[in-house]
């Protein structure tokens, strides 16, 4: 019997694959047998070396950066992971910070998915899209208004695209990571008071590892998830259940 979790013979494009969650997803896809294209605004040298894949320069400061990528080559799996964040009190938040985050975290997600789906429909091949949402797709957060708005948008767009594209053989789902040990959370983990507060709410009793997100992405990209459409899968150690 074939392995329902195998990605052998598939090509996966992972955006924002330089470090952290994006790199972990790329490595997990490669372990599952996929050929990996690591995309980023700077060279993903380590990721490419670890996966044996290739690098693709994509800077989503231009939300349409990937518009010509999928017509030029067959890509079976798209992981929309690239993202940025800006922090400030809502009373002081600037229009430029709002637009920068929305362009990368939401507008680029939609139009990259659109370009992928157009190519998949033209080939009649189907495909898998995994968007990276957030706990702030469900909660409000503090001092990150554009990030919260964008991640709520990712959850909604994921469901919308699933409704439209499931019948075309394209699975669209998302992962909402919890508190994960990455460079972005280093300051939080180094603060003994804040770290203890966070851990006290996580039923699993630990911070997540980037590989936890990688393995979830492999599931959603695999044949095992063929009947999974429009799901925003929280990988959070139980944070939202608390």
Image: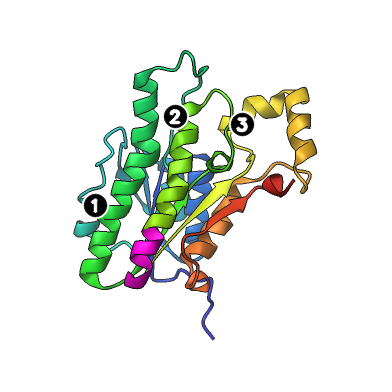
User: Which of the labelled discs sits on residue 231, or is there none?
Assistant: none
* SS class, disc 1: helix
Q: Is residue 213 left or right of residue 156?
A: right
As drawn, 217 above or below 120: above
Discs 1, 3 touching: Cβ within 8 Å: no
Asked if the magenta segment contains residue 163, the reply would be yes
Asked if the magenta segment contains residue 194, the reply would be no
Closer to us: 27 or 173: 173
Query: Residue 215, image x and y in percent?
Result: 57, 58
* SS class, disc 3: helix
How packed is label 1: few (under 14 Cα within 10 Å), some, or many (20 or more)?
Answer: some
Q: Residue furthest top?
A: 92
**Residue of label 3:** 185
Question: How far, Cα to Cα, is label 2 from label 3?
Answer: 19 Å
**Residue of label 1:** 69
- Residue plotted at (43% across, 64% down): 34
Q: How many marks?
A: 3
Task: Say which quadrant the C terminus sits in.
Answer: top right
Examine the rendering and report whether any part of residue 169 can be seen: no
Of discs 1 and 2, which sits in the foreground?
A: 2
- Residue plotted at (23% across, 70% down): 123
Closer to us: 98 or 189: 98
Question: How far, Cα to Cα, is label 1 from label 3?
Answer: 32 Å
User: Which of the labelled discs sits on residue 146, or is there none?
Assistant: 2
As drawn, 2 above or below 104: below
Magenta-tinted stretch: 161-169
């Amino acid at each position: 019997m074939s392995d329902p979790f195998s990605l052998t013979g598939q090509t996966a494009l992972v955006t924002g694959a330089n470090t952290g969650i994006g790199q972990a997803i790329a490595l997990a896809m490669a372990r599952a047998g996929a050929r990996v294209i690591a995309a980023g605004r700077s060279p993903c040298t380590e990721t490419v070396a670890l996966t044996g894949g290739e690098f693709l320069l994509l800077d989503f400061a231009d939300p349409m950066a990937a518009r010509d990528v999928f017509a030029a080559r067959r890509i079976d799996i798209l992981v929309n992971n690239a993202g940025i964040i800006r922090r400030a009190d809502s009373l002081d938040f600037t229009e430029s910070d709002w637009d920068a985050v929305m362009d990368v975290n939401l507008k680029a997600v939609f139009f990259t998915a659109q370009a992928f789906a157009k190519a998949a429909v033209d080939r009649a091949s189907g495909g898998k899209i995994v968007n990276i949402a957030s706990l702030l797709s469900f909660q409000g957060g503090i001092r990150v208004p554009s990030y919260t708005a964008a991640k709520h948008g990712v959850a909604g767009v994921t469901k919308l695209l699933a409704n439209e594209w499931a019948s075309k053989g394209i699975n669209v789902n998302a992962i909402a990571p919890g508190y994960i040990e990455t460079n972005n959370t280093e300051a939080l983990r180094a603060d003994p008071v804040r770290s203890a507060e966070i851990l006290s709410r996580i039923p699993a009793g630990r911070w997540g590892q980037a590989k936890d997100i990688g393995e979830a992405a492999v599931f959603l990209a695999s044949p095992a998830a063929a009947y999974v459409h429009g799901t925003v899968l929280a990988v959070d150690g139980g944070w939202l259940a608390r």
